[in-house]
Amino acid sequence: MKLNIALLAGDGIGPEVIDQAVKVCDAVASKFNHDITWKPALTGAAAIDAVGEPYPDETHAICEAADAVLFGAIGHPRFDNDPSAKVRPEQGLLKMRQKLGLFANVRPTFTFPSLIDKSPLKRERIEGTDLVFFRELTSGVYFGERGRKDDGNTAFDTMTYKRFEIQRLAKKGFEAAMTRSKRLCCVDKANVLESSRLWRETVQAMEKDYPEVTVSYEFVDAVAMRLVQWPSDYDVLITENLFGDILTDEASVISGSMGLMPSASLGEKASLFEPIHGSYPQAAGKDIANPLATVLSAAMMFETAFGLHEEAKTIRDAVNKSLAEGVVTEDLADGAKAYKTSEVGDWLAENI
């Protein structure tokens, strides 16, 4: 099978973890007789430095023509520490999501048997956790009208949703629930926000199309609490952009490290796969970053974008073996030998 993949390394540790994912993908392609064409492209601070734009038209053209996009990370401290900056790396991420129509962010949270005691939560609370968030990605407060008034002393950001935006995200959630335990939780703030009331009534109207799915409705603050109390109670959760951004980061630490969790961003045609961690600039260039979330994102890519389930399983099996045998970076070494980012990538590729 010929696979045309856009490769967006981005900023910080992005290039380092992407390099390891490429090693693993190439090993899988060799094992299963696939032909991968990688198309590198600039984004984020690296693109700003090169062309003054965080998501250049050339990058968009490469992504649009690709079968899938494998993405590293975006962000740089010099922009974070400058509130007056007019162009920011994160603007490229929002622009990319919008232009590619990536409206559904899929973030699984699960535990690894060999790492379960590394979680900040007690073993008995997290054993059996296997949930997935579907976060709306191209609307809400991040894309709403915003500005300043009263000579800059008042700021506003508007959360706006259209019914069709909720329907297409919820549809993916319902479809996922049908393949899992047939349980769906809609997360909102319908007791306060009008946009959340539209979310709730829209999802309620869709229940009749999925009679086998049991749907619950919970306020976002309650879910934030229950995620750290009884995360295994949840299976598929759907929510809007801002709530999803916060809750998925909270859920990510259940596994013991943000460096372990993959994600996908899906649209009607395009699909993008990325680790959930940020650019971690303090570790950039030191060969110490954990590449496993990016490698597992590549596994999601094989499965979701190409329907290559055996290839995805091969990657996950290699990752689980590396964890069980202690072939991990310093964030997971716990006093034992810590492997370099590149060494973990080499080990995974060789085992595949």
Image (cartoon, helix red, strand yellow):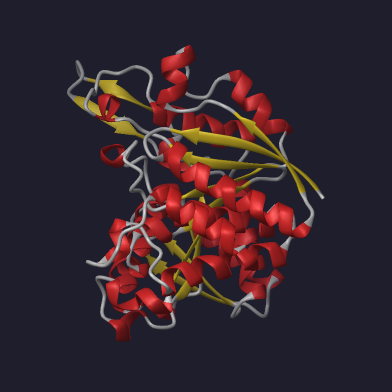
Residue sitting at 72 percent across and 52 percent down?
A: 29
312 horizontally vs 327: left or right: right
Residue 17 showing in the rendered view: yes
Q: Quadrant of the C terminus?
A: bottom right
201 horizontally vs 3: left or right: left
**Residue 71 image point, x, y percent:** 53, 41
- 276 or 183: nearer the eye? 276
**Residue 92 image point, x, y percent:** 47, 28
Q: From the viewer's perspective, is residue 77 above or below residue 67?
A: above
Q: Residue furthest top?
A: 51
149 horizontally vs 219: left or right: left
Q: From the viewer's perspective, is residue 120 above or below residue 74?
A: below
Q: Which residue lies furthest to the bottom in this view?
A: 124
**Residue 127 image point, x, y percent:** 39, 83
- 339 or 319: nearer the eye? 339
Residue sitting at 24 percent across and 70 percent down?
A: 120
**Residue 20 image point, x, y percent:** 51, 48
Quarter of image, res 335? bottom left
- 193 or 188: nearer the eye? 188
Residue 202 showing in the rendered view: no
Residue sitting at 55 percent across and 67 percent down?
A: 318
Q: Residue furthest left?
A: 153
Question: How many discs appear?
Answer: 0
Q: From the viewer's perspective, is residue 115 above or below residue 145?
A: below
